[in-house]
Image (cartoon, rainbow, N blue to C red):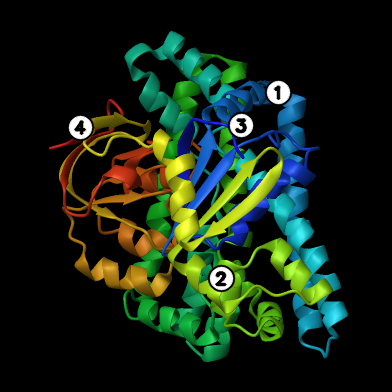
Amino acid sequence: MFSRVSYILHTSAEHPLNKPFLQTERNLYDTDILESIQKDIAVWFENGFAQIYWSEDDIKEMHKESKKLLDIDQAKKIIDGCREIYNLYWKVQREVIDSAKKPLTKREIAVLYDKYISVFRRLLWYFIAMGDKLTYAVEKDLEKILEEKLGRKAKEGYISITTPTDADLLHNELMDWRKVITNPAHEMILEHANKYSILLPNTFSHEDALSWAKSRLGKKSLAEIEHEILSADNRRKRVKERQREIFSKLRSERAEELSSFIREITLIRLLLKSCWNGEAYHMLPFYERIAAIAGCSLKDLYMLYTREEIHNLLHKNINITKEELEQRKKYCLLHLNNKKIRIYSGEEALAMKKKIIDPSLPKKEIKSFRGNIANMGKVVGPVKVIKTDTPSVMEKIARELTPEHILVAGMTNPAMIVLIKKVKGIITDEGGIACHAAIISREMGVPCIIGTKLATSILKDGEIVELDADRGIITRL
């Protein structure tokens, strides 16, 4: 049925099934774009927590593909493509939501869904393309220049010149949050939540959004928010000045080109993330219509159906059973192999995982492992492994955290700020220099190691580790 493949953990998160399904489909349908070359992907879901595994052979090919972006024209082309798909996504999203306010036939809903999801799939691909696999060659070339010019200070220089100095989407959100503080009416809150749904992953009602906002309103005064904005502005000025100093020492136009590309895609990835991280919320009226046709809850539709299954529901009146949904809630395995995507559920999924994924898993007793340095420093403390993206759950976890904790996640997202502000270190499975964990760890001034490929698989809540982000090593004590 399938060939033996060696897999590496790419990332993990509380994902809906449809997101990795669409990201996998890109290799079958969106093959005109860089890196749509993967042949083997395995995604394991257990109680809603997804671990996404990519094959070693595919990753090697993606690294080779990444050399194309050493050409400035190719790099510009991919950035332009990101901006175009971002703008197109919100154009189509608005069209769909406006239509969802009117009476629609099932056929009309089907046509709208097909149009929306084809754009959404390409957007998800562009987000992957801006990750560490496609920036691999650019990062390696830049590191080489800095090592030759700066020696032992190369890593600090690398972090400085790849840190964005322009205000990003989250800074703009904080600026706009001041309006909500001064006028916390429901209409203002919902307008803000819809505009910045990136902070509301897996949020399935306006009531949940209001609850999130009211909790946040009680945490900081307007004066404290103003101070945070000013501090961020000053930090960016300091980084910009440090970049000038480093570039004057380097005297390398190539280093400036490569670092400029990384800074730009860091900001673009955050924009792309704003399209999918809060998709359930900003697509709420439309998905409610489809859930009614499916005869299930909005949450079950969003978390457990694939694009193909929604297409079959709307076009062919073929629905998946309630028994299948219940099995997927516990165990589910998505597998791309031989140009086919297969989905296994329940006990069958567990059995297939043992055959497909388990032979590639790291030993649980491993004492130390490496990752990429996102922000330097060295700390020791108990870990807190995060396996949720739901804001209300993260609020509860935040109340349990202490300043001694080290955060462990597949990847960080903006909704985790409530957690990140309380810890002294960050470790992730995923990540290149342009990922969210890299950005936020520098803003918060905490040591951070990204791209470990196994942290959430082996670390357990409460165990003590040494996070040495000067050397890129995590040691279990």
Q: Earlier in the sequence, mark 2 or mark 1?
A: 1
Secondary structure state at the residue bearing disc 2? helix
- Badge 2 vs badge 3, beta-carbon distance below 8 Å: no
Q: CA distance from mark 2 to mark 3?
A: 36 Å
Nearer the viewer's eye, disc 2 or disc 3? 2
| Type of amino acid under label 1 | Lys
Q: CA distance from mark 2 to mark 4?
A: 39 Å
Q: Earlier in the sequence, mark 2 or mark 4?
A: 2
| Type of amino acid under label 2 | Glu
Specify whether 125 is left or right of 196: right
Q: Is residue 451 visible?
A: no
Q: Position of residue 228 (x, y in %)?
A: 37, 61
Secondary structure state at the residue bearing disc 4? loop
Please state, as top left, top right, bottom left or bottom right, where the C terminus lies in the image: top left
Q: Position of residue 330 (x, y in %)?
A: 43, 66
- Residue with the mark numbered 3: 134
- Residue with the mark numbered 1: 68
Residue 324 numbered tag: 2
Q: Earlier in the sequence, mark 2 or mark 3?
A: 3
Q: Earlier in the sequence, mark 4 or mark 1?
A: 1
Q: Earlier in the sequence, mark 3 or mark 1?
A: 1
The residue carrying pointer 4 sits among few (fewer than 14), some (14 to 19) or many (20 or more) residues within 10 Å by Cα, namely few
- Residue with the mark numbered 4: 367
- Badge 2 vs badge 1, beta-carbon distance below 8 Å: no
| Type of amino acid under label 3 | Leu
Residue occupying the point 61% across, 18% down: 254
Nearer the viewer's eye, disc 2 or disc 4? 2
Residue occupying the point 79% across, 46% down: 29
